[in-house]
Image (cartoon, rainbow, N blue to C red):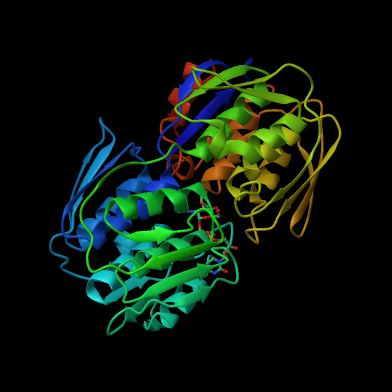
Amino acid sequence: MEKFIVQHSGPLRGSVRISGAKNAALPILAACLLTQEPCLIQNVPPLTDIFAMTALLRGFGAEVSFDTAAQTISVRAQQLSVSSASYEAAGKMRASFLAAGPLLARLQKASLPLPGGCPIGSRPIDLHLKGFSLMGVSNRQEHGIVELWCKNLRGKPVYLDFPSVGATENLMMAAVLAKGVTIIENAAAEPEIVDLADFLRKMGADITGDGTDTITIRGVKELTGAVHQVIPDRIEAGTFMAAAAITGGEVCLEGIGEELLKPVIAKLAECSVKTEATSAGLVVCRKSRLRPVNVKTMPYPGFPTDMQAPFMSLLTLAKGTSMITETVFENRFIHAGELQRMGADIKIDSRSAIIEGVEELTGASVRATDLRAGAALILSALAAKGETEISDIYHIERGYYQIDEKLRQLGADIRRSESS
Ligand code: EPZ
């Protein structure tokens, strides 16, 4: 298995282009199942999770072609041959369950592997199923498969106990072809939800309120194909902002504005990391010592949980005591143990982490446990004295396109090696 070998790297300097957002592209690709007409999705990075989704769509009978050089994917779901996905195709990625809404809308049935748990949490789907059942869908779960079926989908008011991103997306995609009006209350408001709604509106859907906690969808008879450019990846951008901060450098992020990054920009400013919107892009720099801060992850527009691990790496070197509270996932501090191997001083108490800043980190052999934890280890390795070996980097490559090449462009000393 491949590893990243990272040496202590001086201040990162230069420009980096931010890729399209994985977490916007995945639901949008699933939404292509809602029409028999061709769709063209642009600004999609060739990530392993994206390839997994294209394989899943092909498994349902859609024609899919991915021009990886142009980063565009064309999808035509003219004939949907099966509404069930093999565990092989769907089991690898939890986002596969986002095909449920479109398949119910098109075929009134679906069978998908239960999205397995993962290191950060059990990843339940009870909110998805509660919304579907209100819309007239029955479900049965056995042998790790969820069978879903309905006579026809009815628009209904649905209250989400938690503003789940995936549940909001799945219910939106089921509702666009349902009979009647669906109102999703306590809906997720992430930018990726708005991007999906923009794509669905281009297809002819009637959706209002996306980006707020109440989304109204009036069902229509059918949808047409559409062309859509995916928004930039705010978590990749935040990760590179943290890389500039942890190395004390100055980096320009091309292809993204401050709009998608407000909570991260605000928290970085508290740490004495400055961000400036320029004609070239977002310039991030740190000139003075990192200051400790308290961070609480929240659904959008709060501080994103996907930025928690990269931010923890940063705070291990801040002068003083910081606290991180993770309110979204129940087990998202696994990276703390790997950071401690590099000399970080972190104490975990349930959903809170107390971080005492240290003078320096030292390189070690560490393991990526999920994509954001893996990115956090790269950041710490850039600042640590000596060499760090990061294994299981396949996690990282699920969500960061060419992260090593992009970091090398900024002066980082990071290379791949085959593990012995
Ligand atoms: C999406 O996951 C993202 N993934 C995650 O990014 C992100 O961390 C998460 O939203 C929160 O922002 C994609 O978009 C592909 P949720 P999702 O449903 O939809 C609970 C990354 O690193 N919940 O908002 O699965 C759940 O247990 C990934 O790119 C229920 O209880 O997240 C969790 O505690 C990681 N019942 C909380 O809600 C449900 O039916 C948030 O989950 C669904 C969720």
- Between residues 36 and 411, which one lies in front from this camera angle? 36
Q: Is residue 111 visible?
A: yes
x then y, percent, for residue 134: 44, 81
Q: Position of residue 52 (x, y in %)?
A: 32, 52
Q: Quadrant of residue 316?
A: top right
Using the rendered image of the protein, determine whether residue 383 is visible from the camera's viewpoint.
Answer: no
Position of residue 186 relative to residue 16, above or below, is below
Q: Residue 249 vs residue 201: left or right?
A: right
Point out the residue furthest to the left here. 79
Residue drawn at x 60%, y 29% is 241
Q: Is residue 259 left or right of residue 397?
A: right
Relative to 63, residue 260 above or below:
above
Residue 22 x, y percent position in the rendering: 42, 45
- Compared with 287, 312 (above or below) is below
- Furthest residue to the right? 320
* Residue 79 to residue 264: above or below: below
Residue located 72% across and 30% down the image: 269
